[in-house]
Image (cartoon, helix red, strand yellow):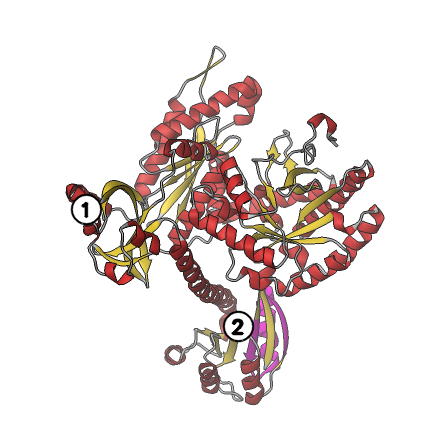
């Protein structure tokens, strides 16, 4: 009998007990799994008592049990697992397949019954069950997270300045204090079961009824209605009610918000539009699109109506750009943006995603409508004649489609699938539409990964990567220069490739460790030269989860610091909160090592975890960087404001300075100033640039080095 560890992927090691009396049979089993790409480390488990003890004391992922196992028997194994209440899948193997035995063991609770003559089947079952187990564990974590989130949301709801209520079948079931105050009520029991119609002035009753009839037919949309509210004393007031679908204790209901109105709503709308708009095309920009896509993916995973993403790129754009120049190509991109906007069906979200890439979210799960939408865009672009500097030009586009359903795992997956589909459309000659097919596109994905692996290895070997720098400025008057480093790579034509293209491929292998080392070594070289000419500069450097687990990284950093003659406190290493949670032991060792080297340690994406501040009990942290999602609509989103304020206050009590990234406008800056946050970062200050010329001291740019 054997205990073994199976590496199905880099982040999930399976601890498995094999109950099999014959050592030869075990070797055959292990050999078969190795041939299937499953890495195994095994050792003996010799008795029922030892098995019982291991089940109770160890975290196990699988039991593989021979149907004829003697000590323990299959029934004893199943009984022991059931008594512990643990989620440990049992796979049964047998000499020959017997349908009656299969039915029996499955009825006992085994996950599958496999014939020894077909051990290849076992490798597939293991991978399937590993995936299912991973999902079940994530689900349990998410359930806990949801409970914590519900507590947090309830606290935010009760403290919100906006009047918020929840209504089921026209009756109030909950209201926050601001809502009670808005209608002149003091006792929460007064509103329980009261019709929402009682809060609307009689002259608007018909208007309100008609709105509710139409609203009930829309599944996902948030809508608003302007009516006169009616207080308990008979006084009326103007109210804009926002309606959205919600749930309380699993029961569907409607959330209604009456927001605190600003003095200049028109100005606020214009500012919000400008910060989310691409100047060249008038479509939404990349950041806004990513935020919306993330929300749509979350809704889809939760079971909301499906949708699709279109990834649209002009064919042969490089040649067109060379022929007509940057100004002329910008005119063409503007034309494509206009066509997409004018062709888009209702409720679609259209954006310029990068230099010559456009994206669209089509909010329907009707594949015919999705295909027709893509075909309309393709056809309109093909038939369009653009006038550029007295020249008439035509062009075509290739369109990749990625379906967004409950099986997607992330926004990045949706983008990657749509990008791959568009790439395949280009390879087939362009001017066509290709819908992502996981099976058919698998080889194409492998080919693309091989391509990027080659590009990355070449970039490391030939030092083709380059660094750009974004300032982190103090709101407390401190003049120390702080820059976060970002990685860039240019293609053969000099076009910038953003990390999102190649880092996901690198993160699947140890290439990401090599990239991290390239960044660290080149950052130290630049920093040493900069400090040598009198700049008191600090670099913030991101590291990956894989680098965190590299046992040689701390000694290597130490040696490089000595060689560069740099003080440790001139470097701050950044790790994302999710990576720290997943690899807590490694993160703790890494943080302690940095402390010994006098380097700084920062947690980014902070505040969106299950219990973020609990993490600080295990890690020595010098900076906290608030999760960028809290910067979304910060000037108008009271919930985000409350979250930022609570994080800053809690961090202050622990003596931890806080950085806000993705600061894009003056209104957000004003809010952040009021919270007492220490540092800000984002395009409002400066985009990542090749030169470090930001004025931290208030002096003119001419007096700053452009090193």
Q: Is residue 11 visible?
A: no
Q: Is residue 69 visible?
A: yes
Residue 264 vs residue 450, the one in the foreground: 264
Disc 2 crowd, CA 10 A, few/some/many (<14, 14-19, 20+): many
Q: Residue at x 55, y 60 (%)?
A: 612
Residue 594 point in image, percent of width and height: 73, 57
Residue 578 point in image, percent of width and height: 56, 57
Determine contact: label 2, label 1, CB under 8 Å.
no
How far separated are the C-alphas under marks 2 and 1?
Answer: 51 Å
**In the picture, residue 447 is in which quadrant?**
top right
Q: Residue at x 41, y 55 (%)?
A: 159
Locate the C terminus by quadrant: top right
Label 1 belongs to which residue? 213
Provide the residue span drawn in magenta: 15-43
Locate the N terminus by quadrant: bottom right
What SS does tag 2 mark? Answer: loop
Disc 1 crowd, CA 10 A, few/some/many (<14, 14-19, 20+): few
Residue 498 point in image, percent of width and height: 59, 39
Residue 189 vs residue 69, the one in the foreground: 189
State the mark number for residue 61: 2
**In the picture, residue 538 is in which quadrant?**
top right
Relative to 501, is 178 above or below? below
284 relative to 659 in the view: left or right: left
Residue 480 is one of the magenta-drawn residues: no
Query: Of the residues under marks 2 and 1, which one precedes in the sequence?
Result: 2
């Amino acid at each position: 009998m054997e205990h073994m560890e199976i590496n199905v992927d880099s982040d999930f090691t399976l601890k498995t007990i094999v109950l099999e009396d014959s050592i030869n049979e075990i070797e055959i089993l292990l050999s078969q799994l190795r041939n299937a790409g499953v890495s195994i480390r095994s050792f003996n488990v010799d008795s029922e008592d030892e098995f019982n003890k291991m089940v109770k004391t160890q975290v196990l992922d699988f039991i593989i049990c021979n149907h004829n196992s003697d000590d323990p028997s299959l029934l004893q194994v199943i009984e022991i697992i059931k008594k512990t209440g643990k989620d440990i899948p049992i796979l049964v193997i047998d000499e020959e397949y017997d349908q009656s035995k299969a039915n029996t063991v499955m009825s006992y609770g085994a996950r599958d019954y496999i014939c020894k003559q077909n051990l290849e089947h076992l490798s597939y079952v293991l991978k399937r069950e590993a995936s299912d187990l991973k999902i079940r564990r994530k689900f349990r974590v998410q359930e806990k997270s949801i409970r914590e989130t519900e507590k947090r949301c309830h606290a935010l709801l009760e403290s919100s300045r906006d009047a918020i209520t929840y209504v089921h079948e026209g009756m109030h079931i909950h209201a926050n204090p601001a809502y009670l105050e808005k209608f002149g009520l003091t006792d929460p029991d007064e509103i329980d079961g009261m019709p929402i119609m009682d809060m609307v002035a009689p002259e608007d009753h018909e208007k309100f009824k008609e709105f509710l009839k139409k609203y009930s037919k829309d599944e996902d949309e948030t809508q608003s209605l302007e009516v006169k509210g009616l207080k308990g004393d008979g006084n009326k007031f103007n109210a804009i009610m926002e309606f959205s679908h919600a749930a309380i204790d699993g029961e569907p209901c409607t959330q209604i918000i009456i927001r605190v109105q600003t003095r200049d709503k028109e100005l606020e709308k214009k500012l919000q539009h400008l910060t989310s708009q691409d100047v060249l095309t008038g479509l939404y920009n990349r950041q806004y699109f990513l935020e919306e896509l993330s929300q749509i993916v979350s809704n889809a995973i939760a079971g909301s109506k499906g949708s699709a993403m279109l990834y649209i790129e002009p064919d042969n754009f490089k040649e067109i750009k060379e022929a007509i120049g940057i100004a002329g190509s910008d005119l063409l991109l503007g034309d494509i943006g206009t066509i997409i906007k004018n062709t888009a069906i209702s409720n679609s979200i259209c954006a310029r995603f990068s230099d010559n890439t456009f994206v669209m979210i089509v909010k329907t799960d009707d594949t015919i409508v999705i295909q027709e939408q893509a075909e309309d865009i393709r056809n309109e672009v093909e038939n369009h004649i653009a006038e550029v500097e007295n020249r008439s030009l035509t062009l075509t586009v290739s369109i990749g489609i990625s379906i967004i359903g409950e099986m997607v795992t992330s926004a990045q997956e949706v983008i990657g699938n749509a990008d791959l589909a568009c790439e395949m459309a280009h390879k087939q000659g362009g001017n066509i539409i290709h819908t992502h097919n996981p099976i058919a596109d698998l080889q194409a994905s492998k080919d693309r990964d091989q391509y990027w692996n080659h590009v990355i290895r070449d970039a490391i070997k030939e030092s083709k990567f380059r660094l750009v720098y974004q300032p982190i400025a103090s709101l407390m008057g401190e003049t120390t220069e702080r820059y976060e480093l970002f990685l860039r790579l240019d293609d053969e034509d000099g076009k910038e490739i953003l990390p999102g293209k190649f880092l996901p491929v690198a993160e699947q292998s140890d290439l990401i460790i090599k990239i991290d080392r390239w960044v660290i070594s080149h950052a130290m070289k630049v920093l040493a030269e900069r400090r040598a000419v009198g700049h008191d500069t600090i670099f913030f450097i991101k590291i990956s989860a894989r680098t965190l687990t590299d046992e040689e990284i701390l000694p290597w950093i130490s040696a490089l610091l000595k060689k560069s003659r740099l003080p440790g406190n001139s470097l701050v290493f950044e790790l994302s909160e999710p990576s720290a949670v997943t690899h807590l032991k490694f993160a703790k060792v890494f943080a302690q090592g940095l402390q010994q080297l006098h380097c700084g340690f920062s947690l980014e994406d902070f505040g969106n975890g299950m219990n973020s501040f609990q993490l600080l009990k295990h890690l020595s942290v010098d900076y906290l960087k608030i999760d960028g999602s809290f910067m979304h609509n910060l000037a108008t989103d009271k919930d985000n404001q409350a979250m930022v304020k609570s994080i800053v206050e809690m961090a202050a009590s622990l003596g931890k300075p806080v950085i806000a990234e993705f600061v894009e406008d003056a209104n957000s800056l004003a809010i952040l100033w009021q919270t007492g946050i220490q540092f800000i970062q984002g395009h409002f200050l400066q985009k990542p640039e090749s030169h470090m010329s930001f004025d931290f001291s208030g002096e003119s740019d001419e007096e700053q080095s452009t090193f």
